[in-house]
Amino acid sequence: MITMKVAIIGSGYVGLVTGTCLADIGHEVICIDNNEEKINTLKKGEIPIYEPGLKKKVNKNVKEGRISFSTKIKQGIDNSEVIFIAVGTPPRDDGSADLVYVENVAREIAEHMDTYKVIVEKSTVPVQTGEWVKKTLQKYGKTGVEFDVVSNPEFLREGSAIKDFLNPDRIVIGVSSKKAELIMKKLYSPIDSPIVVTDIKSAEIIKHASNSFLATKISFINAVAEICEKTGADVNLVAKGMGLDTRIGPRFLRAGIGYGGSCFPKDVDAFVHISDKVGYDFKLLKEVQKINKHKRSSFVKKIQDKMWILKDKKIGVWGLSFKPNTDDMREAPSLDIINALQKEGAKVKAHCPGGMENAGELLSNVDFKDCPYETVKDCEALVLVTEWDHFKNADLKKVRNHMKSPVIFDGRNVFEPNKMKELGFEYHSVGR
Ligand code: NAD
């Protein structure tokens, strides 16, 4: 087994999973974060985020001495050959990526770096960031200390992050030297997957282009859903018929209320922004953004059209996190939908297996319930926002009996319309 010394700076969703998985394949990893509370939680054997299987893997690798946690960046840099930057790159008001955390970390690395290091951009960053990281390291670093910058974008999905990291469709490595290429190949050698080696700028674009393409697929089927709804066709059947064509594929063809989360909205925004900056008007992606926004508002309009007055009506919401199996509430459609329902005077109760704690900080006047059936009790409508299995497998007779009037607005097309009719529900979904 090859053991390399690795530091991860930024121990959030991506950093912690990257560090844990690299430790799990045999490397010696130190995960750094400037959030003291996060590091203390990790030191106590607890995990600050909800990610299936992560706690077990972290604890195993701590026990076997391959992973440790610290707030001290110097400690990580001194002891490591490969240093990952995995800090957040949140959106700014104009849609561009905020690179202030990346710059801060690059400066800190420069100040402490005494021997050759490979500095890896793991965060999602716009094309040409690698050049800025290199300039920053040169400007603030000690003379004569060599380094290489590498772009190694991450494609994991929250909810299946460990599996995605350890069994990726591909590993992308953008390099400007053979030495860095070999080090990165050695690092990933225990993982059996194709490695795509490119220049740094191409690797940066691969990440933005991939997420933008997936978002385009979602907005495409959501636009098709509009036509289906207006003509009496069923978008789920249309997607099935399209998806079996191997040139198209079935994934990301599920109609619903659109994408959210910490990646798609911000990465599409950032790609549009960088395109504008370099003089290309990426109209296709601007339309993708527009369709996605429209899905949320048209879903609320549908609820209003069917329920007429919302004031003082109790509405139950199932699912708050932006997708199942995560606690991540960033850009979650539930936020816009609940705010819009409350603006009309509705009284909202909500349940989510993962998102309630974080949602509590972002929403007000929502009655959070621990049980899906308590959530729908005496409600005049149930709004399904996130398709957790928990809801897919719910006892629908019990749901019907708990509700004041059995009306469901299914934003994820989880249930079968005919079956819902048989069960006595007034059932509304998307594009069918
Ligand atoms: P996150 O907010 O969960 O984690 C970022 C961490 O960096 C935080 O814990 C923060 O405290 C820490 N940090 C910030 N500045 C620091 C500093 N100066 N020193 C040490 N630590 C610092 O973010 P995330 O979801 O892990 O995303 C990180 C990057 O990975 C982003 O660019 C994101 O776009 C990209 N990405 C995310 C996902 C995902 O599913 N979350 C998937 C692929 C790529």
Image (spheres, grey):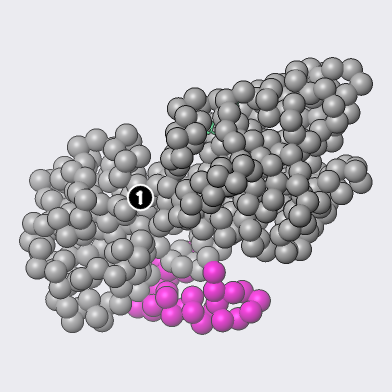
Classified by dominant secondary structure, the portion drawn in magenta counts as helix
Query: Dividing the image into 4 quarters, which one contains the C terminus?
Result: bottom left
Within the image, what quadrant is residue 361 found in? top left
27 relative to 351 in the view: left or right:
right
| In magenta segment, residue 189 | no
- The residue that mark 1 highlights is 354
Q: Which range is magenta?
A: 223-251
Query: Residue 198 location, x and y as percent?
Result: 83, 51
| In magenta segment, residue 242 | yes
Query: Residue 225 location, x and y as percent?
Result: 42, 68
| Residue in the foreground of this view, choosing between 398 and 41 | 41
* Residue ID at (43%, 40%): 46
Q: Secondary structure at mark 1?
A: loop
Within the image, what quadrant is residue 250 found in? bottom right
* Residue ID at (31%, 53%): 353
415 relative to 289 in the view: left or right:
left
Regarding residue 221, the answer to whether it shows in the image is: yes
321 relative to 273 in the view: left or right:
left
Query: Dividing the image into 4 quarters, which one contains the N terminus?
Result: bottom right
What amino acid is at disc 1?
Gly
- Name, please, the residue furthest toward the front: 64
233 relative to 238 in the view: left or right:
left
Query: Residue 392 location, x and y as percent?
Result: 31, 68
